[in-house]
Every structure is written in C-alpha cells, then in structure tokens.
Amino acid sequence: MTATVKYDEVEVGQQIPAADYPVRRLDLVMYAGASGDFNQIHWNERFAKAVGLPDVIAHGMFTMAQGGRFVTDWAGDPGAVVDYGVRFSSMVVVPDDDQGAVITVSGVIEEKLDDKRVVVALTARSGDARVLSKARAVVRLA
C-alpha cells in the first residue's frame, strides 16, 4: 500500500478533522489479552479504586494506539508512518456502563520535510483531559 494523501496537497497548519474512538471495558479486556498487560487497574474497578484511581483506566499503550490509528486512517497506509511518539499526560477513565469513554484525536500538519514526509502534531482528549502530549508522527505521503 501507499499513502492516499498527497504531499503536494497538504500545507503547514492544515487541520486534520477529529475522530472519536469509543472505549468500553470490553475493549480493555481484549487489549489486555492481545498485549499481555493484565494489570488489574485496567479491568478491576475495586482494585483500581483501592490504589487511588477514580475507576478503571485504559492502558497507556491502548490510548497511544488510538493516536496511531488516527494517523494511519488519515494517511491511508499504516506503512506510511515512519516515526511516532507521545507522552502520557492524563488517564482515560472508563466507567462500567454502556457508554464507556471516548478518546477524541485531531491533528495538524506541523512541518513539511524532504522525501515527501510531514510531521503531524496530534491532540488526544478524553472528556476535559488532554491524555497525550507531545504526540507527533512523521508520515511519508504519496
């Protein structure tokens, strides 16, 4: 595959529309199985509260993956992402109800590099909290 977004058609400052990614407890259980991270703070409400958390929280890497998903969905090719990094700035609290939580990710073209690469700065929020900071992806476009 190759990226579907063309380098010549993006500009610095261009906004990438936000996308919402729902998170339910079931998603966390499935992620625990896939990642091998069975820490009880990600699925056991009683334990999470006993260690001082407000409720069960999403895995940091699950949250990071939603940012990566946003970039690959936008670019049209997972292989187009040549670098990706974030810092975790807040937790995604996932209540045990039919709604769960939502991670909202948006982006902006921060810089155009050589070799048809761009730097995408990401913003990821859950509720009122910014859950990722210094989130950046370098993407090679068509």
Image: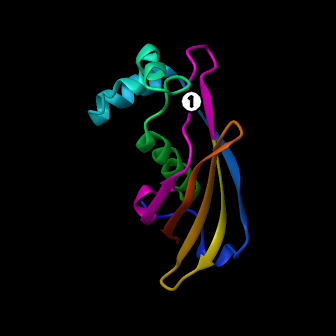
- Relative image position of residue 101 (x, y in whole percent): 61, 28
- The structure residue drawn at horizontal position 56% and vertical position 29%, both measured from the top left corner, is 93
Depth check, front residue: 139 or 54 = 54
What range of the chain is rendered magenta?
A: 76-103
> In the picture, which quadrant includes the N terminus?
bottom left
- Relative image position of residue 107 (x, y in whole percent): 65, 59
- The structure residue drawn at horizontal position 44% and vertical position 14%, both measured from the top left corner, is 46
| Helix, strand or loop at mark 1 | loop
Crowd band around label 1 with a 10 angstrom C-alpha radius: few (<14), some (14–19), many (20+): many
Quadrant position of residue 11: bottom right
Q: Is residue 78 left or right of residue 93?
A: left
- Relative image position of residue 76 (x, y in whole percent): 52, 56
- The structure residue drawn at horizontal position 38% and vertical position 31%, both measured from the top left corner, is 31
Depth check, front residue: 71 or 90 = 90
Quadrant position of residue 122: bottom right
Q: Is residue 7 above or below residue 61?
A: below
- The structure residue drawn at horizontal position 26% and vertical position 33%, both measured from the top left corner, is 36
Scheme of colours in the image: rainbow
The number of numbered discs placed on residues in the rendered structure image is 1
Depth check, front residue: 6 or 12 = 12
Give the residue type at disc 1: Val
Q: Is residue 106 above or below residue 7?
A: above
Residue at the disc numbered 1: 93
Q: Is residue 43 left or right of residue 75?
A: left
In the rendered structure, does residue 99 fall within the stretch colored magenta?
Answer: yes
Q: Residue furthest left?
A: 36
- Relative image position of residue 133 (x, y in whole percent): 57, 57
In the rendered structure, does residue 100 fall within the stretch colored magenta?
Answer: yes
